[in-house]
Each structure stands twice: as C-alpha cells, then as structure tokens.
Image (tube, rainbow, N blue to C red):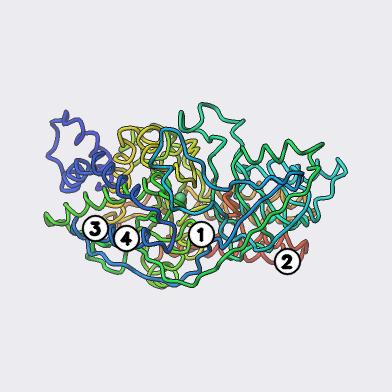
C-alpha cells in the first residue's frame, strides 16, 4: 500500500490538481523536499568551486573540504572531515622537443583562451598524467591513431615496429590508462596523448562546448591496482601534436623527439567531507557521494556533483530541522582524490567496510551531475526499477536508459569492493574542456548547464530516491539481475569462443532460471523484507553480474579472469563456483 500511495504522490503534489485523499506524511515530506533545492544555490556553489585550483592535496583542495563540511553543518547535518593517507603524483619537470634543425622546444603550458580570463589564470602548473613513469626518451614518434588493437595491427602491417618508439595517441577510445598500458606492453618507450578536435560535432571552446586545439586533457594513467606505468607519458595540445605529425611520413616521424618526464610521488594526508542525518536504524544507511577534488578548477567535473549534493543537503537538512528523522541514516560525501585513482572513496570503504557490508543499502554517485544536455545513468539490479521510477517522476524522462554499472568513478569501491547496490547518474555532454583549466564557471554557465537547471533537478532526483530508500520496508529487488546475467552470459560465450575455450552455459543458464523463478515470487511480496538477508543476496549478485575493465563493464568477472589464463580447468572451476553462488543467492530469496 505504501508503495502504491507513493507512486501517485509526486504527480498530485506537483500539479495539486487531484482533490482525492489527503496527502500522506510521505507525500507531504516529498513535496516539501522538492521545493528546496535551487538553481541559485547550485550556481553559488559553482562559483566557490571556481575560485581555487583544487588538485588533491593542494591548499585549495583543503579549503573546499572545510567549505563542504561547514555548508553541511549549516544545513543541519552532522559533518566532519575524515582524513586518510595517500600518494599524490605531481610533475618535477616536463619537456618535449622535436630534434630537427633547428630544434623545436614545445611550450607545454595551457594557452590563454580568448574571452575566458577565469580559465586562463596562472599558477596551475603544467598538464601531466598522474601515474606516468619517469624518464627521458629520445626516439622517433609513431602515429598510433586511437591507440586500440587495430591501430597496432595497421602500424605493424605498414612495417613499423612500435618497440623503442614514442606512441602518439588520440584520447577517447578507452580509459587513457588502458591506452598507455597497451603501448607499454607493445614495447613503446613513451606515450604522447592529445585530443583531436577534427571529430567535433560543433564549435570548439571558447565559442562552443567541444574541444579546441589548445585544450589539454590531464588525467591519470594508473591501472586498477594504482601501479604507475614504467614508461613516461605526457598530454599535449593538438597544435603541438600537429607539429610532430607534420614531420611524419607514413605514420613515422623523420626526426626524433625527446620526451622528458620526471614525476614526484608525495606521501600525504587527504580529506573526505562527510555529512550525516542519523536514522533511527543506525546500522543501516544510504550514502550519496561525488568527488570534490579536480584536475584544475573542475566546475563541471565534479563541481557540478558537489553543488548538486549540497542542494540535497540543504533540502534534507531542512526537513531534519523541522522534525523529520529518516529510518536509515543518510550520508552525504565529498570525496577527495577521485582524479588520481578514486582514493577518497576507496579509503572510506576500507575504513568502514564491515559497517557497509552489514547495512549500506545503496550508494548513489554523481560525477558530472550537470556537465551537458544528455541524461545518463547506471544502476545495480537491486535498485534499478525504483531508480527508474524516481527518474521518470522527478526528471520527466519517460523511458530513461539505465545501463549496467561499469567503471570510472567513486561507486567502484562500493559495488566491487563490498557489493553495495549503486546508482550513478547525471547529465553529461561534450565537455570539451574536460580536465583542463577551462572546465570553469564560464563553461558551466554557458554550455554545461545554462540556468543551473539540471543541478537542481538531479538534486531533486537524488534526494527523493534517498528518502524512499531510507524509509522503504522493501528497498531491494532481484528480477532486474536476470537480464544483466543473461546478456553477460552471451558475452561470456563469445569471449570463450575467441579464446578457443568452452563455458558450460547450460549449468549457468539453469542457475539463472532458478534465480529468476525465485526473484519473481520474492519481488511480488509486499510484507516487509528481511533487509540484512536481501542485502547479502544483492551483494552476491552485484559481484557476479558486474565489474569494470577501465571504463567498460564486464559480467562474470571471475570467469573472465579464468578465461584469460587460457586454462579450461580454471574456467570449469570458476563456472562451478559461480553456479554455487547463484544457487545460494536464489535459496535466500523466500
Ligand atoms: Zn569526475
């Protein structure tokens, strides 16, 4: 009954046109909440984010940690800083030269953008890749296109040996760390990255939202174990890249290039900003988070997420002050060091692991909540249907396309470390100023979210979903896992074939069918759920159905890893173990 009433709540609350039954407490709370997040509030936070360079460990980063804590306190949350130890990478020295006569020494600085004085501020240092190796390489440069497998095949068939050369790679096809690792595995001595504006679908910054030939994308290149590369890598702009390309014939430079990267690894303390509204069931929680650190000013990435979360805090804090206490604790987090390996969220999960395992019902992430016009989301099966309902009701998107969890932001430690069901959502777009100083207030207000409307509506969606998850007697569901498992199984069979191995798909299909039958019956029940048991099942299924490889998602990760060993016996053992886990999960659903 609760759910049925709630289903109609927003429509009637928003239109005030139905003279039916008096609104329930929950309806009144939801409409009270919806009225609070504001575009003006988000704009004001964006201006604060825009004020300082806040790469992890800088004074600006620390100031913003305190700012976010203090804002949450002002809104009525219990808020604190949780410090954690971390390794922060910065460049000691960087240089790049084309050894023609005369030698061309490249200017590696961000160039001033006409009309954007804010983004052209000094004092931000040279662009670099966190996790680059250190070293000096003098070698010819080979054009490796997008840097994916077929580029290496093409270059090889042109008779060019990548070994010992510097790879020139256009960003974008995959997570840049995967591109760098592939180059290293092929024997490249170094990598130069750039963003190619020739594929833009519209005007380049500062005249539009797309990358220009002077924007330089910084970014990390570490693998999932946070191990730095052995070879040096450097991001440059397209203007400099064109000078190197002009020296090439058939994809190989005539002259050599001298690439010098000297990195500094500093052991230091970083800061997560954590706010809480304690619930009556203190052992159960809903966590909302985004990253507060940035490569430079990061007003869209992820200043938009922080501005959004502070609007959620303003709304929930106001309800709390007027006497509302959620059943489950609601936590709002501003993570540090997402940009250099998702370190803040990983530290939080490590520090609170057993508590999260016992009672974290869901983690909702927003990284670039409002960086462009296109809505996107990914959700774990346990909360996917309820997330769809909230998105439909609060954002007015009739059939939101919600994908499976993959990689690339702070939800990873929650879902892959603990199995916590996650939702990741936001409005994204070209963000041509990504990881550059031009991801600033000018870009946000002109291109990412004019009027700061999406900041406000995403805050409404996150807040309403958090309230429902915090109150629901049946917060977790299981039917949506079936589709993810079935499509994952199809991919698995394909992968196995490519590697000339076999996957016992009959046993896996049977286990998925058993789970499906149980889940259908379980999800149809209306009496309160045994939440700790349901959470255990969700955690189990999340780890079977989802995993990340760079930015992409992969189901059945343990079987995929077994396939990579090339041993049929290892594959068979993992299939058997997975069938047991699926059967265990199914047996708990009654
Ligand atoms: Zn981000």
Q: Which residue is mark 2?
A: 570
Using the numbered discs, state the Cα–Cα distance from disc 3 to disc 4 in whole angstroms.
Answer: 14 Å
Q: Earlier in the sequence, mark 4 or mark 2?
A: 4
The residue identified by callout 1 is: 340
**Residue shown at the point (60%, 52%) measured from the top left:** 554
Residue 72 disc label: 3
Could you tell me if the residues under marks 1 and 3 are in contact, i.e. CB atoms within 8 Å?
no
Q: Which residue has dot 4 on it?
A: 63
Residue 311 screen position, x and y as percent: 26, 48
Q: Secondary structure at mark 2?
A: helix
**Residue plotted at (32% across, 58% down):** 64
Query: In the rendered view of the protein, which quadrant contains the C terminus?
Result: bottom left
Which residue extends farthest front?
102
**How many angstroms separate mark 4 from mark 2 (CA)?**
50 Å
In the displayed orientation, state which residue is furthest to the right. 159
> Of discs 1 and 3, which sits in the foreground?
1
Q: Nearer the viewer, residue 584 or 349?
A: 349
Residue 532 to residue 196: above or below: below
Question: Closer to the camera: disc 4 or disc 2?
Answer: 4
Position of residue 542 measured from the top left corner of the image (x, y, whole percent) = 50, 58
**Could you tell which of marks 2 and 1 lies nearer the N-terminus?**
1
Q: Foreground: 221 or 287? A: 221
């Amino acid at each position: 009954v609760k759910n049925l009433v709630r289903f109609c709540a927003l429509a009637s609350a928003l239109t005030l046109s139905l003279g039916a039954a008096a609104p329930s407490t929950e309806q009144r709370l939801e409409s009270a909440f919806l009225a609070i997040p504001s575009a003006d509030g988000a704009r004001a936070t964006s201006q604060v984010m825009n004020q300082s360079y806040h790469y992890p460990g800088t004074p600006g980063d620390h100031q913003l940690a305190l700012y976010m804590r203090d804002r949450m306190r002002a809104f009525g949350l219990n808020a604190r800083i949780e410090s954690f130890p971390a390794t922060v990478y910065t460049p000691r020295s960087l240089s790049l030269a084309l050894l023609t006569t005369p030698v061309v020494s490249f200017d590696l600085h961000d160039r001033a953008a006409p009309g954007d004085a804010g983004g052209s501020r000094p004092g931000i240092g040279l662009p670099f890749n966190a996790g680059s190796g250190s070293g000096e390489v003098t070698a010819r440069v080979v054009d490796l296109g997008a840097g994916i497998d077929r580029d290496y095949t093409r270059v090889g068939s042109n008779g060019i040996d990548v070994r010992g050369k510097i790879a020139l790679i256009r960003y974008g096809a995959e997570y840049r760390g995967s591109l760098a690792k592939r180059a290293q595995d092929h024997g490249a001595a170094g990598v130069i990255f750039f963003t190619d504006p020739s594929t833009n679908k519209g005007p380049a910054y500062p005249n539009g939202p797309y990358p220009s030939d002077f924007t330089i994308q910084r970014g990390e290149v570490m693998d999932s174990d946070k191990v730095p590369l052995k070879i040096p890598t450097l991001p440059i702009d397209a203007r400099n890249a064109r000078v190197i390309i002009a020296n090439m014939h058939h994809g190989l430079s005539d002259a050599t290039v001298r690439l010098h990267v000297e990195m500094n690894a500093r052991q230091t303390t970083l800061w997560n900003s954590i706010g809480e509204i304690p619930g009556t069931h203190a052992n159960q929680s809903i966590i909302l988070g985004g990253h507060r650190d940035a490569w430079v000013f990061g007003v869209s990435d992820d200043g938009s997420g922080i501005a959004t979360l502070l609007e959620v805090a303003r709304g929930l804090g106001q309800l709390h002050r007027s006497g509302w206490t959620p059943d489950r604790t609601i936590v709002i987090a501003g993570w540090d060091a997402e940009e250099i390996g998702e370190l803040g969220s990983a530290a939080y999960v490590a520090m609170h692991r057993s508590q999260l395992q016992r009672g974290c019902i869901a983690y909702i992430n927003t990284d670039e909540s409002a960086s462009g016009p296109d809505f996107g989301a990914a959700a774990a099966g346990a909360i996917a249907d309820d997330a769809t309902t909230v998105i439909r009701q609060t954002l007015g998107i009739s059939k939101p396309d919600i994908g499976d969890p993959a990689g690339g932001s702070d939800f990873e430690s929650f879902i892959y470390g603990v199995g916590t069901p996650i939702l990741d959502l936001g409005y994204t777009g070209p963000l041509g100023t990504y990881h550059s100083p031009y991801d600033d207030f000018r870009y946000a207000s002109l291109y990412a979210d004019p009027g700061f409307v999406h900041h406000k509506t995403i805050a409404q969606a996150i807040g309403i979903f958090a309230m429902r998850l915090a109150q629901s007697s049946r917060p977790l569901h299981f039917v949506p896992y079936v589709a993810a498992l079935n499509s994952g199984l199809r991919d698995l069979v394909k992968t196995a074939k490519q590697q000339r191995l076999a996957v016992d798909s009959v046993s896996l299909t049977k286990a998925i069918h058993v789970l499906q039958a149980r889940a259908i019956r379980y999800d149809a029940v209306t009496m309160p759920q045994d939440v700790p048991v349901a959470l255990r099942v969700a955690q189990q299924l999340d780890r079977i159905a989802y995993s990340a490889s760079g930015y992409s998602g992969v189901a059945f990760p343990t079987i995929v890893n077994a396939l990579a060993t090339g041993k049929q016996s290892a594959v068979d053992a993992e299939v058997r173990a997975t069938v047991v886990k699926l059967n265990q999960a199914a047996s708990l659903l009654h």
